[in-house]
Image (spheres, grey):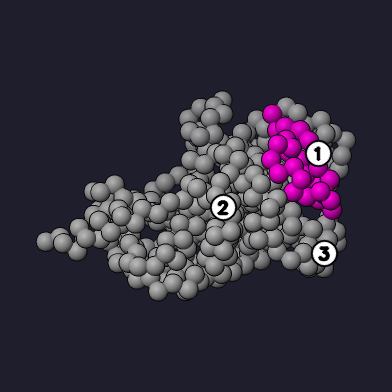
Amino acid sequence: MTTRRRFLGQTAGLLAAGYLGAPELRRVGAHAPLRILILGGTGFIGPHMVRRAIAGGHKVTLFNRGRSNADLFPDVETLTGDRDGQLDALRGRAWDVVIDNSGYVPRHVRDSVQLLAPNVGRYIFVSTGSVYAAGEPRYDEDSPLLKAPDPASEDVNKYYGELKVLCEQAVREAYGDKGTILRLHIVAGPGDPTHRFTYWPVRIAAGGEVIAPGEKDATVQHIDVRDLADFALRCAEQGHGGIYNVAGPAASPMTLATYLEEVRVGVKSAATFTWIDHAFLAERKVAFPMVMPPAMRGLARVSAARAVAKGLTFRPVRETAADTLAWFKSAPAAATKDLTLDLERDARVLREWKARG
């Protein structure tokens, strides 16, 4: 699992160098300017939110440790501290909205909400679809959640989803309907250091015969980071409270066949697809990102209807693919080194698939 620390380390220097495809900072909407505090703001998701907030005419303050990309937003007020007991820079200050991008440990989130609740009108907490218990055929915001086996544990690597459930509870207890929970699906787009979505534009752009894993009608979902940022700021501007699944890339889950074709069109590739079933790939211990195994397919059937009703929109997959590939080609090697194509392995698997009896 990619931890926050590794996440920020991979993006250090990348953001400052402008490799995240900063959008044009045109004024968005006609809402009254807000005072917005962003906890974090210099990783992958945060900068897109900062830029969207500035484009909306809002006054932004960042709170972080000042260790990564400290000079990314020189004209934005930045307060230095730590979620782990060093919140003094926030005391006595007031904002209209806080967006919490860096809440992973329930104790840290409880400390933040208790300190900010008297002086901040709305708390937007960035959570995850990993809060849901596996085994459901599809999911909405009322689906069963994971239960923390040890509420005292702070092992984010081991209990990522379980701890996010407890973080959500802390926000809801303190803020009620003034709390907004965003449960993110896989986040895609320029600058993503996990490379889950990025694999497909890069592999398909390389051309040739591409393994398409599983069944054509299997579903796949992601949310473009820029669509996520836009929705988070919509919630701030329009005062949307409650829990929202933030999942795309369309109003309903997209089939894998359509998804891969959209990527192919987006990167302008002549690649072809050969479909190989999961069992054959599993026997050879071959797996591909973004594709859920059969037992977990419900996690790629997440309803975002509630968010769509509040203004969540989606850019085309081909646009996300093209922009992500452009970023990958121009980014420093340190930001892309973890994504390597094993074309020899793929060729061997394709030969074995075609030679089966």
Q: Which residue is mark 1?
A: 79
The disc at residue 31 is 3
- Is there any visible trace of residue 51 in the rendered image? yes
Q: Amino acid at mark 3?
A: His
Instruction: Please name which of the two marks, 2 or 1, marks the residue nearer to the observer.
Output: 2
Residue furthest toward the left? 357
Q: Are marks 3 and 1 in contact (CB under 8 Å)?
A: no
Res 211 quadrant in image:
bottom left
Q: CA distance from mark 3 to mark 2?
A: 30 Å
Q: CA distance from mark 3 to mark 1?
A: 26 Å
In the picture provided, is 297 more to the left or to the right than 48? left
Which span is picked out in magenta?
A: 59-84
User: In the rendered structure, which disc, 3 or 1, sits on the residue that comes first in sequence?
Assistant: 3
Query: Within 10 Å of the Cα at label 3, are there few (<14), some (14-19), or many (20+) other Cα atoms?
Result: few
Query: Within 10 Å of the Cα at label 2, are there few (<14), some (14-19), or many (20+) other Cα atoms?
Result: many
Q: Amino acid at mark 1?
A: Leu
For the point 70% across and 64% down, the residue is: 23
Q: Amino acid at mark 2?
A: Asp
Residue 303 vertical placement versus 64 (above, below): below
The disc at residue 192 is 2
